[in-house]
Amino acid sequence: MCGIVGYIGRREAMPVLLEGLHRLEYRGYDSAGIAVVYRGKLQVTKTAGRVQDLRDRVNDKIKSNVGVGHTRWATHGEPNEINAHPHLDAEGHIAVVHNGIIENAEQLRAQLTTAGVNLVSDTDTEALAHLIAGELRTGGGSLEDAVCRTLSRVEGTYGLLVIDVRHPDELVVARNGSPIVLGLGESEMFVASDVAALVRHTQQVVYLDDGEVATVRANGYQTRTLDNQRTSKEPTTVEADDGDYELGAYEDYMRKEIHEQPEALRRVLRGRLEDRFATARLGGINLDPRELRSVRRVKFLGCGSAYYAGQMGAVLVEELARVPADAEPASEFRYRNPVVDPDTLYIAISQSGETLDTLMAVQELKRKGGQVLGAVNVVGSAIARECGRGVFLHAGPEIAVASTKALTNMAASFALLGVLLGRVRDMSAAEGARLVDGLRALPGQIEQILAQEDNIATIAGQFAGADHMFYIGRVRAWPVAREGAQKLKEISYVHAEAYQASELKHGPLALIDASMPSVVLVPDDELFAKNISTIEQIKARGGPVIAVTSGDLPADLADAVIKVPHNTPELDPILLTIPLQMFAYHTAAKLGRDIDKPRNLAKSVTVE
Ligand code: G6P
């Protein structure tokens, strides 16, 4: 969703800002804008279109060394040019770009209108520009002081970037619930809401904390809290570099990210497999064996694919550690006044670390004394910081809206957690060793699946005309079926529904006919024969079947077969997930969809 960029320093700001906005496009947006200081005035360009359109509109003659930019996902007011950021005060001195939602915006806008201010947009952000200008006029002090006084009147979430044309040597930023990161350069500084916008220029970054404000100048920055306490920050080195954000030889990010999975998986396992004691090592969770043993339940919370990864995690933990485990959408959990149990280990799962529903669930848990770990991909993100401990996913930047490599690394991390919890309980060393070996084999086995891409693309082509599809799995493969159906829906817009194989006969079998293909997951486990009989039931009603299996199916049983290598039964679901990603991808490609940016969806949902 919304993205912020800012630049101050020795180069021309405009290309840096436009490039930064381009890097943030993947998050989803509906309008964009930019403001730079030129000849003592703010030069503002906006569009209700893409960043490319903004690029076409800016005046190339404008040379400036300081400016701000924004991609907007409409919340207050429709997506048009007027509502696009930056927003200015009445005199055009102050420009503000803002991510998040100001909850008392209506009240603040009404106060401004009563005071005679003419509001030109429908946004909450515009109110901030007028309020900051008013604070400067009446209270004086620095821009930072005026921003702090304004924010003390504001309720809601913000990542905020402010520029004052009368002080073009500084930018002021503030954060509450919406990320702001500073990029440190040589005689130049960058500001962004996501490191993607600045890794091209620097890998040294500083993440602001909630309630923190910074003044940024070309040669440095200083931070303080909203109530005027100076803070000191340690720069962090970003893991990713610019190349990780490039498409390279791939036509889109989703295909690139599918193919990056073996490498991403090697990273998440690195240093975490402990052969000597046949267990897993997860230093970041910070729990000693006694604490691990006192965990009575595990509950996974996440949204979208992260929730399905949580379901996979629940199956793994319950099976490997014999600890009751379940998963729930964080979006539901936060609204239902949950009973928070101090002996339950809560795991908040998020690729971006920014999903508002998941962040709110974590905050609710913490308020009620729950112990919560993060399983997060983006270091320095809101959820990672709020949890304070957990497992980083090390999948590398994920740009495509549909999650692939992050989901696989989530599931693998939960297998590690399952082994760790299991080995402090009743799991034998021999069992532990079997799983450690199985985990180590996964990246190579995924490579074997990726090598079957042509076959999977052909099968996807055969079924791309279907309007509806079933995804059928049971027990371990049930979350895999749900995630597979989600992938198909998200990127191909083909309606897909996941069902437990055992439930077919209790209703959905009525829908089976020649126009309803089913993807049936058939892991080589103790339920193999049962799954074969599921396929037979579907075939008997004339339903086409695509079987995805780690076993040997009777010849001619299914209309199409995708084989995955066999690992151990507990880990097979991770392998079964991969062909479903490729199947959805090639179905969407066949249908000519915008695969990386499916309609109506955003990569990170940072609003209600
Ligand atoms: C959005 C995306 C999904 C993603 C979900 C959770 O809905 O479209 O692909 O799974 O958010 O995102 P997170 O960053 O928290 O994993």
Image (spheres, rainbow, N blue to C red):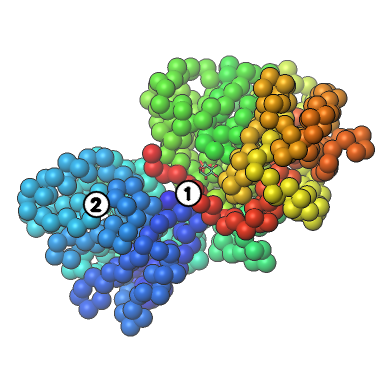
Looking at the image, how many numbered discs can be counted on the residues? Answer: 2
* Residue at x 72% of width, y 21% of height: 505
Can residue 63 be seen in the rendering of this structure? Answer: no
Position in image of residue 554 (x %, y %): 92, 34
Q: Nearer the viewer, residue 477 or 395?
A: 477
Badge number at residue 341: none
Badge number at residue 600: 1
Position in image of residue 35 (x %, y %): 29, 67
Q: Decide: marks 2, 1 in contact (CB < 8 A)?
A: no
Which of marks 1 and 2 precedes in the sequence? 2
Q: Give the side of residue 429 with respect to residue 145, left or right.
A: right
Position in image of residue 522 (x %, y %): 80, 32
* Residue at x 29% of width, y 50% of height: 77
Vertical position of residue 165 compared to residue 214: above or below: below
What is the three-letter code of the residue carrying label 2? Asp
Q: Give the side of residue 8 with respect to residue 401, left or right.
A: left
Position in image of residue 176 (x %, y %): 32, 44
Can residue 542 be seen in the rendering of this structure? Answer: yes
Vertical position of residue 386 compared to residue 525: above or below: below
* Residue at x 7% of width, y 47% of height: 114
Q: Which residue is mark 2?
A: 122
Q: Secondary structure at mark 1?
A: loop
Work out which residue is located at the far bottom of the displayed protein and give it. 61
